[in-house]
Amino acid sequence: MFVDEARILVKAGGGGNGCVAFRREKFVPRGGPSGGDGGNGGSIYLEANPNDNTLLRYRYNREFKADRGRHGEGSNCTGHSGADMILQVPVGTLAFDEQTGETIADLATPGQRVLIAHGGRGGRGNQHFAKPWHQAPREREEGHAGEERHLRLELKLLADVGLVGFPNAGKSTLISVISAARPKIANYPFTTLEPNLGVVNADGGTGKEGRELGRTFVVADLPGLIEGAHEGAGLGIRFLRHVERTRLLVHLIDTSDTSDADPIHSFEIISGELRAFSETLTEKPVIVVATKLDATTDRTRLDALREFCGAQTLEFHAISAATGEGVRELVRSIADALDKIPKPAPDTVLELAHGAHQHAVAGLSDKGDAEADSTTEDTSPAPIKDL
């Protein structure tokens, strides 16, 4: 099951309490205070795992709590610190604070690990409160509570190319031909109910002709859009988040005899739905592809679409995924276009935010130490297929 949204509660472990104890040994008069500090609570991290491609594990398990620190003991023994908890998420996951809406993390790099909830600091034992004028202190600190957060996780698949278009435009058939992905293919609308990823080798041979790897890119096949998708019609536009990270859009339009829709009007409808979702999608480069060339006898609408793309300075291709006509040229053109588009730099929003948070925690700790000195009171893509 493909799950691209989840809401979870994370709670870091609290720190252990400091201990009040005095050293009492034979032949050691006036042993003095010997209360140990409490251990620190465990923190919670998010880690991008390239072997995961869904947030299904967080659909039913929604509460995650790290271990708390153990209390301090006598003989200046510090309590054991709680173990950190690492939550594995797919690469491309974004974490939002559900209460404030703030973007906390963008895990776009495999192996990237981000602190999401800081564990509480352990309290100090009475040994820290000893002064020349107060040599038998009975004060100690309680452990600090760990951070608690309600998170909303949102997965945006990492792909170079996004296939968009109306249902039954031939998107799933195309990705099954150019990659090893095997999506469900049938002759009825909304066959594709979830995104599919495929890795395409643009320069290698096909079949037994060659296995060499050349330029490769990842293609995302999205469920089809219809007019009014931004208002919830059909499957809506919720899956369009998966093409926000793509560098190129390939717009597939059915121009065969089985479709009576105007291809130019179809292009304008899908463009409007993309614009309604995000203006950034309309700024991405687009390649327009007329599909089902093998089932097209009357090429009047095909020629009209080609002229429209020429007037709009849009690259145009006509293909038949069933017979392979024009597919190789399309894949090479996609690879050439990607060579000209720079890859976006990874986002580092969270790391800066957590760096500031850690400085704040350190500042509070230093402030607490200073105050204690003057007083006694006291949180996959599918495998490569050569083309």
Image (cartoon, rainbow, N blue to C red):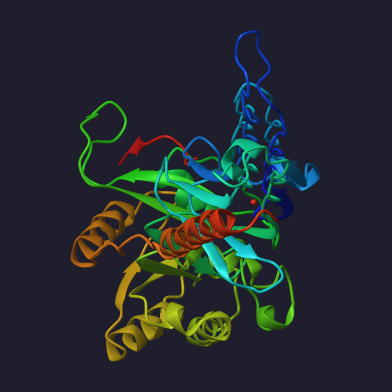
Residue 18, percent across and down? 68, 38
Query: Seen in the image, is 316 located left or right of residue 266?
Result: left
- For the C terminus, the image quarter is top left
Residue 174 coordinates in the image, percent (x, y): 46, 53
Q: Is residue 28 above or below residue 118?
A: above
Residue extending furthest right?
Answer: 60
Quick one: 264 or 278, which is closer to the camera? 278
Could you tell me if residue 209 is visible in this image? Answer: yes
Q: Residue at x 57, y 80 (%)?
A: 277
Instruction: Judge whether residue 1 can be spotted in this image.
Output: no
Residue under the image location 72 percent in, 46 percent down: 142
Residue sitting nearer the eye, 101 or 355 = 355
Q: How many marks?
A: 0
Residue 45 placement: quadrant? top right
Q: Residue furthest top?
A: 26
Q: Residue at x 63, y 24 (%)?
A: 30
Would residue 199 be found to the left or right of residue 72 on screen? Answer: left
Q: Quadrant of the N terminus?
A: top right
Snapshot quadrant of residue 86: top right
Residue placed most toward the observer, 22 or 253: 22
Q: Is residue 67 above or below residue 140?
A: above
Q: Is residue 328 left or right of residue 85?
A: left
Q: Position of residue 273 (x, y in %)?
A: 58, 82
Relative to residue 222, is residue 146 depicted above or below? above
